[in-house]
């Protein structure tokens, strides 16, 4: 029996290639030195694998594709350097369920470690073992691998010192990516608080889910988390990228405002997002209950749905750019192209199309941070564009308010001038007739008509003076404003409209309200907007009432309470009445209330609000002046 064993060991050494450890050895892989076999019936033992001659060669790579089941590998190491060697042997995938490692010297088992994420001897994030080889010593490492998807059965061999440095560097790199993710999340949160745009929430979600994926994929979850099972961490790790894809689809909906611009496309986006979410939920449900075939099928569906989602995201971004153009779309497309390339490289390598190595594992952490930066750039550019458009609208509103004021002035002046001009015209016609036909009575009529003409001219001049003061206020005037007089002037201006609608207006200005006269035109404009809007909504045969109260609260803030009974505001949300070009009137321009809001916020350093109360609209103005 001893002779037979010796012959078998000799034949094994003759037909198996040996990985030689030479002087100054640092790091290498066991590609082309590792042999493997699938244990269909789970009938092999480590000693049998040690002696078998018909193992398969791994050629240049140790990737064997997506395979479920138990595999065995065998690799022979020999130290031919001039000094003893201490090195680490590890599998590059932290996700392996079980890796049982058996170390043989001269046919005798000298060490056995149950590694892998579910192994009882697992102490680090990798399936690994530490080996010591004396000068000329030869060791054979037999390993059994068991995983739901078996990707990698080879080894990376590295000197102990280099391994320690490598792991420290990886932890530092991971810490850097965690820090970058936290910074980007904080930036997104600040932008959300500043601009109140829900789109900024998505980079935060993406950044944190990205950290969860890498936390699990690189083995840190198994090393640092004790309250989650390895199966749960593994499931979460592989579901996260799919969930990210679904969230990206929803992000498009908010980033490009699809609800208002592309309603049909928004339905498609929700449909794709739903498919991706459902595939993730389906996989999670059957993960621990389905058959092998169903689980593999579900995993393929998961990959397909994620790919479909990514194609939908990228395709829609390109479609929008071709249709609308814009820097926002360019940033978005760049982000999607980068992540799609990384996803393709990662997926193809995982499925054996190309070499899967440690460098491939770092594509996603790097690309993910770049991706977040680009979508933040897209989001910021969109926000900046919106702000610029808002500024342009405000400038337009200011110009429109100026023209509107001029138009109101001209309209009122022309209306007020009708009577005196008619009177003056009649006087001139009379004098002309008397001059031509009854010159002897001309002087008599001239003395009679001249005072009337002077009175008409005085009235017209008074009208001009009134509106010159009203619409061109002296901003350097430090005199105290009589707000009661201001309200009286406004009611005189609107007297005809007020009488036509039979409106009763009650005003109450508290005696402790002290306002500089330079604010006269601001309050006048605000009151005119309020009263005009109420009058337009009143019915001629109704009991129409307006109440205006001005007082100062305990904090010294001037409050204006305006209430009518015109039926209230129908717009929903009610605050939309302050938006530009929003009007419930068929012929309305939607300028009045936005102008009032702008004057309150920018000139009075206050705020304006509205609610429906007691059958009408109730406006409240706070002025911090």
Image (cartoon, rainbow, N blue to C red):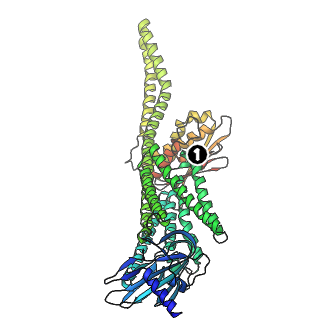
- Would residue 219 appear left or right of 169 to someone viewing this image? right
- Percent from the top left, x then y, of residue 369? 43, 64
Regarding residue 323, the answer to whether it shows in the image is yes
Q: Residue furthest top?
A: 437
Q: How many marks?
A: 1
Query: The C terminus lies in which quarter of the figure?
Result: bottom left
* Image spot of residue 558 (x, y percent): 51, 55
Q: Which residue is mark 1?
A: 264
Q: Between 225 and 258, which is closer to the camera in this rendering?
A: 225
Q: Residue at x 46, y 20 (%)?
A: 424
Given residues 423 and 28, the one toward you in this image is 28
Going by the image, does 381 lie left or right of 100?
Answer: left
Q: Nearer the viewer, residue 123 or 379?
A: 123
Q: Does residue 374 sit above or below 428 in this rendering?
A: below
Q: Secondary structure at mark 1?
A: helix
The residue at 34%/82% (across/down) is 25
Q: Quadrant of residue 86?
A: bottom left
Residue sitting nearer the eye, 521 or 507? 521
Where 144 sits versus 205, above or below? below
Horizontal and vertical percent position of residue 256: 50, 50
Q: Position of residue 499 (x, y in %)?
A: 61, 34
Image quadrant holding the N terminus, namely: bottom right
């Amino acid at each position: 029996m001893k002779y037979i064993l010796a012959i078998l060991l000799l034949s094994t050494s003759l037909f198996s290639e040996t990985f030689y450890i030479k002087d100054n050895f640092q790091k290498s892989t066991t590609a082309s030195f590792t042999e493997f076999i699938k244990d269909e019936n789970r009938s092999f033992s480590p000693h049998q694998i040690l002696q078998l001659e018909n193992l398969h060669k791994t050629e240049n790579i140790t990737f064997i594709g997506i395979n479920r089941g138990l595999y065995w590998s065998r690799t022979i190491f020999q130290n031919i350097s001039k000094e003893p060697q201490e090195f680490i042997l590890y599998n590059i995938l932290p996700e392996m369920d079980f890796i049982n490692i058996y170390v043989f010297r001269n046919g005798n088992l000298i060490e056995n470690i149950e590694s892998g994420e579910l192994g009882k001897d697992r102490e680090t994030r990798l399936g690994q073992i530490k080996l010591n080889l004396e000068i000329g010593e030869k060791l054979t490492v037999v390993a059994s691998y068991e995983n739901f998807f078996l990707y990698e059965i080879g080894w990376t061999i590295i000197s102990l010192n280099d391994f320690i440095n490598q792991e420290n560097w990886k932890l530092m790199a991971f810490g850097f990516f965690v820090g970058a993710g936290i910074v980007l999340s904080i930036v997104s949160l600040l932008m959300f608080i500043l601009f109140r745009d829900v789109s900024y929430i998505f980079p935060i979600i993406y950044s944190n889910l990205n950290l969860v994926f890498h936390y699990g994929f690189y083995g840190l979850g198994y090393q640092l988390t004790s309250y989650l099972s390895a199966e749960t961490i593994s499931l979460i790790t592989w579901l996260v990228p799919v969930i990210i894809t679904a969230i990206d689809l929803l992000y498009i909906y908010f980033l490009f405002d699809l609800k208002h611009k592309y309603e049909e496309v928004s339905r498609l986006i929700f449909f794709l997002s739903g498919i991706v979410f459902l595939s993730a939920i389906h996989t999670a449900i059957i993960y621990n209950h389905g058959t092998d075939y169903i689980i593999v099928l579900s995993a393929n569906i998961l990959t397909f749905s994620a790919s479909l989602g990514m194609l939908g995201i990228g395709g829609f971004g390109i479609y929008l750019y071709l249709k609308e153009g814009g820097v926002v779309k360019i940033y978005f497309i760049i982000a999607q192209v980068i992540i799609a390339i990384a996803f393709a490289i990662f997926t193809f390598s995982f499925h054996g199309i190309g070499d899967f190595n440690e460098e491939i594992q770092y594509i996603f952490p790097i690309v993910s941070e770049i991706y977040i930066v680009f979508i933040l750039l897209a989001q910021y550019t969109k926000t900046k564009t919106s702000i610029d458009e808002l500024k342009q609208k405000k400038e337009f509103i200011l110009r429109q308010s100026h023209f509107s004021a001029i138009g109101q002035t001209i309209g009122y002046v022309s209306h007020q001038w009708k009577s005196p001009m008619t009177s003056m015209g009649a006087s001139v016609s009379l004098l002309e007739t008397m001059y031509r036909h009854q010159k002897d009575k001309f002087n008599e009529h001239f003395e009679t008509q001249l005072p009337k003409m002077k009175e008409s001219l005085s009235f017209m001049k008074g009208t001009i003076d009134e509106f010159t003061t009203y619409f061109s206020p002296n901003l350097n005037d430090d005199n105290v404003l009589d707000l009661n007089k201001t309200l009286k002037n406004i009611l005189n201006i609107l007297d005809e409209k007020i009488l036509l609608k039979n409106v009763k207006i009650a005003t109450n200005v508290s005696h402790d309200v002290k306002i500089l006269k330079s604010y006269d035109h601001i309050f006048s404009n605000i009151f005119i907007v309020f009263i005009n809007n109420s009058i337009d909504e009143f019915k001629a045969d109704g009991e129409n009432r307006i109440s205006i109260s001005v007082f100062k609260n305990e904090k010294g803030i001037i409050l204006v309470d305006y209430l009518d009974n015109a039926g209230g505001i129908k717009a929903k949300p009610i605050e939309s009445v302050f938006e530009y070009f929003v009007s419930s009137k068929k012929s309305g321009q939607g300028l009045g209330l936005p102008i009032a809001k702008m004057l309150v916020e920018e000139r009075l350093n206050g705020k304006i609000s509205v609610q429906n109360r007691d059958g009408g609209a109730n406006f409240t103005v706070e002025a911090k002046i």
